[in-house]
Structure formats: C-alpha cells, structure tokens
C-alpha cells in the first residue's frame, strides 16, 4: 500500500478508535486518548499509542487492554476493510514526562 493510503488509513483508525474508546462503559478506559496509530507494512498490526488524563495510567491501561477484542470488533463495524489489523496497545507516557520537565523547569527558575 502506498504511503498516502497508509497515512489515510492510520488517520481513519485514529478517529474511529477514539470514538469507540469514548463510548466504552469502563470509566478508566474513558480517560484514554489515542495519540498515534502506526500500521506495519502489510497492515496486519496497528500500534496504537494511548495516553491518559489522570495519573493512574497503569490501571487504566490494563482495563483498556482487556477491551481490545471488543474495540477491534467495533472497529470492523465502522471501517470497511478486508481484515482489521491486530491492535497492539502501547502506553504513551510523553504527557507525563512533559509535565515532569515543566515542573523541574519551574523549580530551577524559582531559584
């Protein structure tokens, strides 16, 4: 698949996955944000990077991982594709690290 089509598919997955996660009944999973979706070369695996609003990332991430098969099934209903890729959820801690760095910079500036 060409690069443009892959990017379009990744963007479409990103949007649909975000919608599906927002509609989950699990309160922990609802705190999730899809930050990025990367498909491998044959579109059989989608790496889905997830970040969370609250600090309880690991518990929320675990709860979301339990719903992966449901999310994949819902994705198959929303996107017309021959085979929905396996979803590999990856915890994205960039926001937490950015907040930590900002706090450190503020401490340094106060001195």
Image (tube, rainbow, N blue to C red):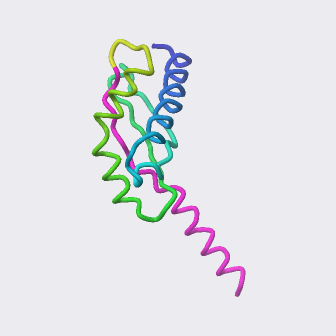
Of residues 28 and 56, which is closer to you in this image? Answer: 28
Residue 111 in the figure: left or right of residue 4: right
Residue 47 in the figure: left or right of residue 69: right
Q: Which residues are magenta?
A: 84-111
Q: Residue 12, relative to residue 83: is it above or below?
A: below
Of residues 68 and 10, which is closer to you in this image? Answer: 68
Q: Position of residue 78 (x, y in %)?
A: 44, 21
Residue 106 in the figure: left or right of residue 98: right
Quarter of the rendering occupied by the C terminus = bottom right
Q: Position of residue 93 (x, y in %)?
A: 46, 56
Most prominent secondary structure in the magenta stretch? Answer: helix
The residue lying at 37 percent from left, 28 percent from top is: 74
Residue 92 inside the magenta-drawn segment: yes
Residue 37 inside the magenta-drawn segment: no
* Quarter holding residue 71: top left
Q: State the count of labels.
A: 0
Q: Residue 69, relative to residue 30: is it above or below?
A: above
The residue lying at 36 percent from left, 52 percent from top is: 61
Q: Position of residue 32 (x, y in %)?
A: 46, 49
Quarter of the rendering occupied by the N terminus = top left
The residue lying at 34 percent from left, 25 percent from top is: 85
Q: Position of residue 104 (x, y in %)?
A: 60, 75
């Amino acid at each position: 698949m060409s690069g443009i089509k892959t990017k379009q598919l990744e963007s479409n997955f990103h949007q649909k996955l975000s919608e599906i996660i927002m509609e989950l009944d699990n309160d922990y999973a609802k705190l999730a944000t899809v930050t990025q979706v990367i498909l491998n070369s044959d579109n059989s695996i989608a790496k889905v990077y997830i970040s969370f609003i609250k600090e309880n990332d690991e518990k929320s991430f675990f709860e979301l991982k339990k719903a992966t098969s449901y999310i994949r099934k819902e994705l198959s209903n929303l996107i017309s594709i021959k085979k929905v890729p396996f979803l590999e959820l990856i915890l994205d801690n960039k926001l937490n690290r950015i907040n930590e760095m900002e706090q450190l910079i503020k401490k340094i500036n106060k001195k």
